[in-house]
Structure formats: structure tokens, C-alpha cells
Image (cartoon, rainbow, N blue to C red):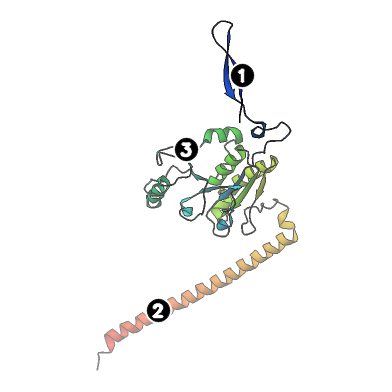
Amino acid sequence: MNQPVAKLTPTTGDQLKVQPIFHIPASQTTSPTVPLPETAPLKVALIGTAPSSRMMAPFADPSWKIWACSPGNMNLLPRVDLWFELHGNLLWPECKSYGEPYIEWLKKQTFPIYMQNQDYVPAAKTFPKDEMVKEFGKDFFTSSFSWMMAFAISQGAKEIALYGIDMASRDEYILQRPGFYFFRHVAQQRGIKVSAPNESDIMQAPGLYGYSEVTPFGRKILAREQEIKGRIEQMTAERNRLDHNINYLSGAVEDIDYVKSIWLGQG
């Protein structure tokens, strides 16, 4: 049974008052020779909407935090720990058709949500944009995933994995990939592991300007491109010739229709 021990507490003047407190058995304390368990390293999986690898994310592994975004992921992901919706135009006339149901869906979710402010979702948290810009500058925030990667880095992530993120369309490749490459570089410089499954090509770096095209592969792909363009030119010329012939014959049919309408009634 626990025995009370004395605790000295000051009262008035120079007198001390003795108060009993309960002694905590040594078995319930942490010995200085026994190290405390270290906090598990932060591992973050960023989830996009590309179907090639989206559902390959480690939803069933609790050691990973699942961070997602986009109305394209509504009602699809088995688990979400944090959501990012950083667009402020969801109710603009051209966006309302998907923005309104998306906002209503966000209001019903129990996971935390980062947004620009609380205009759309009162329970949302304000994303720390100014802090991110102060730490990383403002030149490379080219997509939601740039903001998400910056936030993961700032939170001390030790590993960042990318699922459903390809940035393969021409606009995405031109406008968004440079930001991703920047934050991948920042992460790697800080010792953070960045990865993606083989089903995604987001980790493929662009070629070295002036050098990549003179490699055997660069020369082959250029030759293949020229071959295909040449075939397109031939087919286009053939199509134009056929269009000309079709128009010529269509005119002949119109002439016949005219003759039929005027002359077939003559005896």
C-alpha cells in the first residue's frame, strides 16, 4: 500500500506546513537508465487523383499520415488524416456546378481541413500561407501539391510519398512540375526521403538541356518524332486530295439533281 510522504509548502512568515502526498511506486516511474520511446517519425502520403497509383497509398498502415485534396477524391479514399482545399474560387459562376456539392461534402467531414479562410467551411483551419512563403519564397508554389509538400517539410516529415500524382498533361507539366521539382530538391537536401510508385512518372526529372538530346535515346526519340510527323504530313495531303475529290463529286451530284428536276418530266 502506498505510504504518504511529507511535502513542505510555505505558509505565512518563515513557518513551513507539512502536507502528506501519495508516494508513487518506483515501478510506475521512468528510470533514468530506461530511455523513453522516441516519437515515431512523421511519414506523409500525398494523394492526388491520377487513377494509375492513387489507391496504392498506404491507407491501412497507421504509421503513415494520409493528406489529400481535390473534389476528384470525394468519397473514394479509405482514410484521410488531413485535407487541403486551397482554391478560393469554388463558388465562382464557372465553378459552382462542382464547387457547391464539394463544399457541402467538406462541411460534413470530421478530418481537419486547411483552406484559405473560413468563408466556405466554418470549421476549416486557415492554411499558413505567409509562413510557407517566408520559409521557401514565393516562386514555386505552382500547385496544391507544392503547398502540401512545403507544409510537410515544415512539419518535420522524414518521408514523403506521392500517390495519384502524375502532372502528365501539357499544362500541368509546363506550369506545375517546376514547383514539385523545387520542393523535392528542398526535401532531399534536408534528408527527407521522397518516393512514388513505378506506376507514376512524377519522379522522372526533365532532361539536361543541350545534353539529353545527343544521347542515343535522345537521338532515337527525335528520329521517331520526325518519322511520325512525316507520316502525318502525307496523310494530311492525301486527306486534302480526297476532300477535293469528294467536293468535286458532290457538285456533280447536285448537277444531276438539277437535271432530274427540270428534264425528267419532258416527254
- Amino acid at dot 2: Ser
- Amino acid at dot 1: Ala
**Residue at x-position 67% and y-position 43%:** 192
Q: Where is residue 101 shown, x and y percent of the image?
A: 38, 51
Comparing labels 2 and 1, the label whose residue is closer to the camera: 1
Is the residue 29 above or below the residue 82 in the image? above
Rendered image quadrant of residue 11: top right
- Quarter of the picture containing the N terminus is top right
**Badges 2 and 1: C-beta atoms under 8 Å apart?**
no
- Using a 10 Å C-alpha cutoff, classify the residue at mark 1 as few (fewer than 14 neighbours), some (14 to 19) or many (20 or more): few
- Amino acid at dot 3: Lys
Visible in this render: residue 144? yes
Rendered image quadrant of residue 199: bottom right
Mark 2 and mark 1 lie on one chain; the one further toward the N terminus is: 1
- Using a 10 Å C-alpha cutoff, classify the residue at mark 3 as few (fewer than 14 neighbours), some (14 to 19) or many (20 or more): some
In the orientation shown, which residue stands out farthest toward the front?
A: 1
Q: Which residue is mark 2?
A: 250
Q: Where is residue 182 shown, x and y percent of the image?
A: 63, 43
Is the residue 135 above or below the residue 176 in the image? above
- Quarter of the picture containing the C terminus is bottom left
> What kind of element bears circle 2?
helix
> What kind of element bears circle 3?
strand
- What is the CA distance from the residue labelled 2 to the residue labelled 1? 111 Å
Q: Which residue is mark 1?
A: 6
Q: Which residue is mark 3?
A: 125
